[in-house]
Amino acid sequence: MSIRIGILGYGNLGRGVECAVKQNPDMELAAVFTRRNPADVHIMTETAKVYHVDEAVKMKDEIDVLILCGGSATDLPKQTPEFAQYFNVVDSFDTHAKIPEHFADVDAAAKKSGKIGLISVGWDPGMFSLNRLYANAILPEGTDYTFWGKGVSQGHSDAVRRIEGVVDARQYTIPVEKALTAVRNGENPTLTTGEKHTREVFVVAEEGADREKIEKEIKTMPNYFDEYETTVHFISEEQMKAEHAGLPHGGFVIRTGKTGWEKEHSHVIEYSLKLDSNPEFTSSVIVAYARAAYRLNREGQSGCRTVFDIAPAYLTVKSPEELRKHML
Ligand SMILES: NC(=O)C1=CN([C@@H]2O[C@H](COP(=O)(O)OP(=O)(O)OC[C@H]3O[C@@H](n4cnc5c(N)ncnc54)[C@H](OP(=O)(O)O)[C@@H]3O)[C@@H](O)[C@H]2O)C=CC1
Ligand SMILES: N[C@@H](C[C@H]1CC(C(=O)O)=NO1)C(=O)O
């Protein structure tokens, strides 16, 4: 029996999840839900339909896992706890400073409904989080670094699109070369947030919008821009389409550490990603974790989880015996 997947919110991530479900033979897309008029939302899967989000709860017995593809800035804080009352849910919530609060909200709802709520799944938070954990557990004496880009942060782009007067936006995260070089040279530098990355934003504003106000709201936005040197450009819709259509990204997590007694030895752990499509890669991670959420709930588990709580074997269609035989 296939795992029946629902998508709530059809943007970059929603389209990515639709692609990822197609690549997983044990899954099928059951439905897509949107806050817009369903007639205006066109999906690729012929065997699924688009419904208004108000129809979702009626279909709770036809969906095994609902994947929430809304924005972290304003959608997921509300939607994930709301729908964890009825479904096993997975989201990509990435406002790092607010993850504990989001976890508590989802945990309360999921424990009450007997469902699994898997939050902050993707690459950062997600795969990068896992690699930071492994590296710190293995090399307790060491230094961590995370660098992203140059690439398009979907979370930051979404947060800018939510500003009044903004029609569209792309945010590029740019690593500071000097900092990168010092880390790669093993200098173990102490770096502030602003010394590691700068941010560059391209905005399409509504006719007559207050551009000065928009720029100020971007640059002072807590948890997204206020700790960075940020440059804002206002461009036309045509320019946005022509010059910023892609959503590439990537980065790496690096930990340098030491072991030994009389003689000291140095070690470097590095995990890196080079992504043609940030949303499609993120969605591929999310769909693997949707499999885990389904399995955990069938075992009778409920409540909120993050990637830290999921044993790797829950992510794959391969049996534990196959894993031991072919992947160990
Ligand atoms: N953890 C991680 O590693 C990562 C996390 N993310 C997270 O994913 C979130 C979603 O990113 P992304 O999919 O790029 O955001 P989008 O802006 O593409 O979509 C967000 C929501 O906006 C609505 N929407 C989409 N297109 C339109 C449109 N044309 N007109 C009106 N509404 C629209 C959709 O909801 P509806 O259909 O209901 O209208 C959609 O769910 C980000 O905020 C980020 O936090 C992203 C990448 C990595
Ligand atoms: N959550 C990020 C994924 C990575 C990229 C990023 C950044 O560029 O600031 N931080 O984390 C996204 O929305 O793309």
Image (cartoon, grey):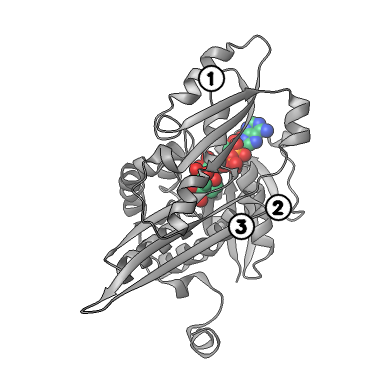
Q: CA distance from mark 3 to mark 2?
A: 31 Å
How many numbered discs, if any? Answer: 3
Mark 2 lies on residue: 48
Mark closer to the chain start, 3 or 1: 1
Q: Position of residue 240 (x, y in %)?
A: 72, 31
**Splitting the image into 4 quarters, where does residue 129 fall?**
bottom left
Choose between 99 and 142: the one closer to the eye. 142
Q: Of helix, strand and loop, which one carries label 2? A: loop
Q: Position of residue 15 (x, y in %)?
A: 67, 48
Crowding near the residue tagged with mark 1, few <14, some 14–19, many ≥20 C-alpha atoms within 10 Å: some
- For residue 216, say whether it is visible: yes
Which disc is residue 274 wearing?
3
Choose between 170 and 30: the one closer to the eye. 170
Q: Is residue 151 left or right of residue 299?
A: right
Q: Nearer the viewer, mark 3 or mark 2?
A: 3
The residue type indicated by label 3 comes to Lys
Crowding near the residue tagged with mark 3, few <14, some 14–19, many ≥20 C-alpha atoms within 10 Å: some
Q: Quadrant of ligand 1?
A: top right
Contact (Cβ within 8 Å) of mark 3 with mark 1: no
